[in-house]
Amino acid sequence: MLTLGNALRLIPVTLVMGIIFFLSHQPATELALPPITGVDKLAHAVAYAVLAASLLYGLEPVMRHRHKPRVTGLVVVVLCLAYGMTDELHQSFIPGRVPSLADLVADGTGAALLVLAWLRLWPGRPGQTVS
């Protein structure tokens, strides 16, 4: 059942998605990343790890009693990848930006690493006591 409290938990994911959209909407000439090899992929991984964390925060109470944590984690990674695909499509319409499979891989990697850490630390996993 969706309660007001659960609905409010979706605010962070909405904000993170909005920030990703805003950053993706910037023309390539206006992006000022440091000239370090791979920094753009690191930025993608971090952004999508934050997206995954906000999705877990928003979805976890609703899905906690209906699904196993691994299913919740898989749903989060799939949702992050789906958003990453729409983000790459969106970038194809922005001057100087091009869609990139490597960016999508970085997005999925960031989301998956965050979910793996969450699964490792999730207090309700078997063999771990909930306080």
Image (cartoon, rainbow, N blue to C red):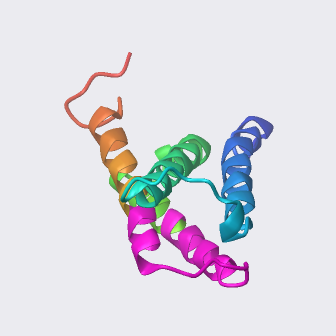
Measured from the top left, where is residue 78 in percent x and y?
Answer: 46, 68
Q: Is residue 105 magenta?
A: yes
Q: Residue furthest top?
A: 131
| Image-based side of 93 in relation to 109, left or right | right
Frontmost residue, 47 versus 4 = 47
> In the shown orientation, is residue 108 left or right of residue 82?
left
Q: Is residue 73 visible?
A: no
The number of callouts visible is 0
Q: Quadrant of the C terminus?
A: top left
Q: In this picture, is 3 found above or below 47?
A: above
Q: Any magenta on residue 37?
A: no
Q: Quadrant of residue 101?
A: bottom left
Q: Over which residues does the magenta segment extend?
A: 80-108
Q: Residue at x 72, y 84 (%)?
A: 93
Q: Is residue 56 above or below residue 105?
A: above
**Which residue is located at x 37 percent, y 59 percent?**
38
Q: Is residue 20 above or below residue 6?
A: below
Residue 77 x/y as whole percent: 44, 61
Q: Is residue 125 visible?
A: yes
Expressed as whole percent of the image width and height from the top left, the position of residue 30 reads 71, 61
Residue at (37, 40) in percent of width and height = 118
Q: Quadrant of residue 82?
A: bottom right
